[in-house]
Image (spheres, coloured by chain):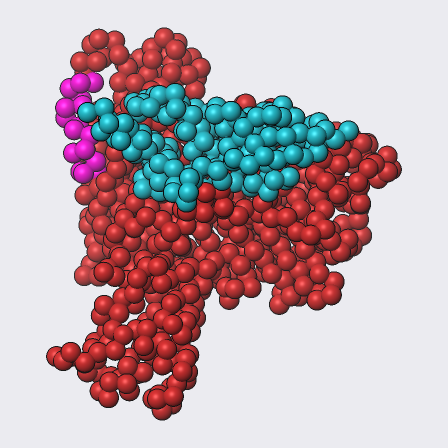
Chain colours: A cyan, B red
Amino acid sequence: MPTKITMTVNGQSVTKDVDARTLLVHFLRDNLQLTGTHVGCDTSNCGACTILVDGHAVKSCTMLAVQADGSEVTTIEGLSQNGEMHPLQEGFREEHGLQCGFCTPGMIMAAVDLLDRNPDPSEQEIREGLEGNFCRCTGYHNIVRSIQYAAKKINEPKKAVAS
Amino acid sequence: MTNYIGKAVKRVEDKRFLTGKGRYTDDIVLPGMLYAYIVRSPYAHAKINNIDTSRAENMDGVVKIYTGKDIAESGINGIPTGWQVNFKNGDTMKEPPHPLLVADKARYMGDGVAVVIAESREEARDAADEIDIDWEELPAVANAKKATEDGAPLVHDEAPNNKCFDWELGNPKEEVDKAMKQAHHITTLEFTNQRVIPNAMETRAAIGQYEEATGKYTLYTTSQNPHLTRLLLCAFVLGIPEHRVRVVAPDVGGGFGSKIFHYAEEALMIWCSERLKRPVKWTSDRSEAFMTDAHGRDHISKAEMGFDKEGNVLALRVKTHANLGAYLSTFAPCVPTWLHGTLLQGLYVTPKINVDVTGVFTNTVMVDAYRGAGRPEATYLLERLMDTAALEMDMDPAELRLKNFIPPFDGVEQPGYQTQVALQYDSGNYHAVLKRALEMVGYEKFRKEQAQARKEGKLLGIGFSTYIEACGIAPSAVVGALGARAGLYEVGQVRVQPTGKVSVFTGAHSHGQGHETTFAQVVADRLGIPLDDVEIIHGDSDSVAFGMGTYGSRSLAVGGSAIVKSLDKIIEKGAKIAAHKLEAAEEDLEFAEGKWTVKGTDKSIAFGDVALTAYVPHDYPEGVEPGMDFSSFYDPANFTYPYGAHVAIVEVDKDTGYTKLKRFIAVDDVGNVINPMIVDGQIHGGLAQGIGQALFEGAMYDEDAQLINGSYMDYTMPRADDLPSFEIDRTVTPCPHNPLGVKGAGEAGCIGSTPAVVNAVMDALRPFGIKKDLEMPLTPERVWRHMQG
C-alpha cells in the first residue's frame, strides 16, 4: 500500500505516494530525479548515499522514505547557495579531492556534518570523520586537503569578525 | 596566456560531479524502460536439472523471464576473449564457451542462470525469489595449483587438468639452471599473490535499447572502452550490424581494469531489448559486483634468484600458476603472461631469466586486469626477493638494488635496454629515483632511529620497492604477434569549428583520470587558444569514430599522441590558409601563441580567423579543401616504461600484530607531465590500492569455492584513517618515442607500493628472526601468529 509522505528537499516541499519499503535513497533518485546521491553498496558501508536529514549526515540507504516524512532533507544538489559553490565543493575542486566523482557527493555531505560538529579538525580527526565513506580513486590524500581548505575558508570570516 | 603544459590546471569536469550533475549509467531513465534482475548460481559448481519459472511469471509487473535455455536456443555466441596464448607444444589454448546465461551447469558462484524483466526493479527482484531451480551440486575447486592436480574437479570437460595454456619466456631453462648452479646464494620464495576485488565505487550497469522503427541499438554501459565493447557485441556475440549499434559509456565511476571487459550483461540487455521492444536496465548491486566483476592477481608462484658473492644477480627462475577463473575474460590470458613474464627483468641487469606460467580454470569468477595487471605481480615477486636476499646475505636492501640497476640510458643518444624477456625499455635513470627516495626518507637517520626503537622493544620497519612497468599499450604489430586479437592504437579527431572553438573526439575513456582537462591542456597549448575553447568528447561511439579505450596507462601516451597527430595536421593546413591570407610563403610563417606570423614582421593572422576562412572559403588558397577537421590513428612504436622507487615505514604492535603505516614515500618517473595535480592524484590512488592489497584486501574462497567475504562487511577496503598522507616526488625522463614524451601514471602507485609495505613489515619483524614468509594481506592476526613463531 502506497503511503503519502511530505518532506522538504533542498528547500522545496514535496509530497509523494511511496511504497512503505522504498528506501530514502531510491525515493530521491527515482521519484525526485535527484541522481546526485549514489548507491555504492547494499550494506550501508560505503557512504556514497550520504545526505543531510534535519542537518545531520545520514546514509540514505539505511532509512526508509516514510521515516523521513516531515523532515528537512539536503542533497548535494541543494548545497550551492545562489549559484555559489559551498566551501567544501570549492575545496574538492581546488585540492583535486575527486576523480571519478562517484563517492564525491556522499563524501562532501559527510564532511558538511563533520565541519558542523568540529569546525577546525586536525588531519587525524578528518580521517576518522570520514570512516564511513569509501573512496577508491584518491587514496583520501586530497580529500583531507579539500576538507582542510573548506575549514579554513569557513573559519576565516569568523576569525576576522572575532579579531 | 595559453601555455598549459605542466600546469596544475583545475579540472574542468569537476563542476558537474560536485553539484550532483554527473550522469552515470544508472542515472539514465528511458521512456518505457524495464528493469532486469539476474538470477545467479549460489553454488560454485552445479548442474541445473530443471528451472521452474511458472510461479514467478505470474507475479505483478513481470514482463518476461529468460533462462540459459532461451539463450542457447537463440543460437547466439558466448563472450569471447581478446587474447590467445597457446600451449608450449603449439596446441591451441583451451577456450570453452562463455554463454550469456548458462543452461547446463554453473561454473562459479554468481554464474547467470536466468533473467527476470519487470516493470520495476523491486518487482523483478521479488519474482526472482520465486524461481525454483533444481540444482545438483558438484565438487568445486578455487585454488589454481590444486586445480591442475589429477582428480581435481573439472571446470570444463574440454580442458584436462583445468589447464588453459602453459607458457614460457626468457632464456632456455638449462641456461638458467646452469647460472643458478654457479650462484653463491639463492633466495627462494613461495607465495600467493592473492586475489583482490577491484571495487570501483560505481557498480556495473547496462541499458539495452532497441528501436524497432530504425533498427538501431543503443547500449549504455559502465565501460572503460565502449568501442571495443561494440566490436565484440557485433562481430562475436550477437551478430548485429555494427553501423546500427551505438555504445555509450557516460560518466563512469571508476574502473581500475574491471570495466575494460565485455561482460555478458551488456549483450544480454541488448538481446532482451530487441525481443521486448523496450529499453531494459540492469544495475549490479554490490554483492553481485563482488561475485561477478572480474577479479585481479591470484598467482601462486615459486621464485628463485641467484646471486654471486658480491650480491650481483646471476639468474631468476619463476614458476607461476595463474588463476583465470571459470571462463576467459577479455584480456585474461595476456595478464599473467605478456604483462607479467615480460616485466621480470625489473630494473636489474639479471643476465638469465626463465619464467614459466600455467593458466588455470577454476570455479571462481573470472580473473583479468586489475590496476597494474601482471606488472604488480612481477614487481611483488622481484622486490620481495630483493629484500629477502638482502636480509639473507646481510646486505643493505637499497645498496643491493643500486648495485644491480641497469645503468642510465635516454633512448636517444644511448639505445633502449633490451631485456631477457622480450621488451626493450625506452629510457630510464633508475638510480636517480631510489637515491631521491632515500633522501626523502632520511635513510641513515631512520636506521639509527630504528636501532634505538628496537632497543626499546618497538617494531619499526622499512621496506623498499623499485619497479618498472610496460604502459602505453601497445604497438599493434607487436601485440598481434603475441596473441592479441585486436590492434591497440588510438584515435584522436580534432574538429575546429568555424568560430575557432575546438571539439576533440578521443577513443580513450575517462572514468576519473581527468582527460577532459589534460587533453584540453595539450590542445589549447598546441593551438595557442584558451582552455575554455576546447571540449573533449569521449565515451560515445556515435560521436567518436573509433577507439580502443582506457587501460594500461595508455590514454595520454597513445590517445594523447593521436590528438597531437591531428593537431599537427590542423596547424599544417592552417599554415596554407594563413600564407594565402598574409600573401606570404608558407615557409616564411611561424605559428606561436595562436597566430601565424610572417617571420621578422608584425604581420599575422589569428587561429580563429584562419578557422573561419576554412569554413567560409571565399578568398582561399587553390587546391586546399575547405574545413578544418582531422582524424588520426596513432599506433605507438613501443610500450612506455614508467618506473619508480617506493619506501614504506611501518610500526607493528607487538601485542596485537596491528601494522601502522607511518610513512609512505614514492618517487616515480612517468616521463613528461602535462598536469602535475592530476598525476599526483593518480599516484595517490594507486598507492592506496597497492597498500590495500598488502594490508587489508583479499578475496577468500572456502573449500567449496564459495566466496565468503563478498561484501563490504567482510572485505576490507582501506579507509581514510588506515592511510597516512603520502610523500611523493618525481624525476622526469621523457619517453623518446611519442610526441608528448609521456609514459603514463595510472598504475604506477599500485605497482610499486605493495611489496614496499610487506618488506617493511618483514623488516619490522626482524628481531624475531623468523625466516618464514608472510602471506598477504598482513592482517593483525597473521602478523601476530607469525610473531608467536
The answer to whether residue B239 is visible is no
Q: Specify whether B731 is left or right of A131.
A: left
Residue B453 falls within the magenta-colored stretch: no
**Residue at the extreme bottom of the image, as rendered:** B622
Identity of the residue drawn at 60% across and 52% down = B220
Identity of the residue drawn at 33% across and 24% down = A119
Q: Specify whether B689 is left or right of B328.
A: left
Where residue B520 appears, x then y in whole percent?
35, 58
* Nearest to the observer: residue B193 or residue B547: B547
Identity of the residue drawn at 35% across and 88% down = B620
What segment is highlighted magenta in the picture? B434-450
Where residue B417 appears, x then y in whole percent?
27, 54
The answer to whether residue B137 is visible is yes
Q: Specify whether B598 is left or right of B31.
A: left
Where residue A41 appears, x then y in whole percent?
56, 31
Quadrant into which the C terminus of chain B falls: top left
Whether residue B77 is situated above or below residue B682 in the rendered picture: below
Identity of the residue drawn at 53% across and 30% down = A73
* Nearest to the observer: residue B587 or residue B22: B22
Whether residue B46 is situated above or below residue B532 in the rendered picture: above
Where residue B500 appears, x then y in whole percent?
36, 71
Quadrant into which the N terminus of chain B falls: bottom left
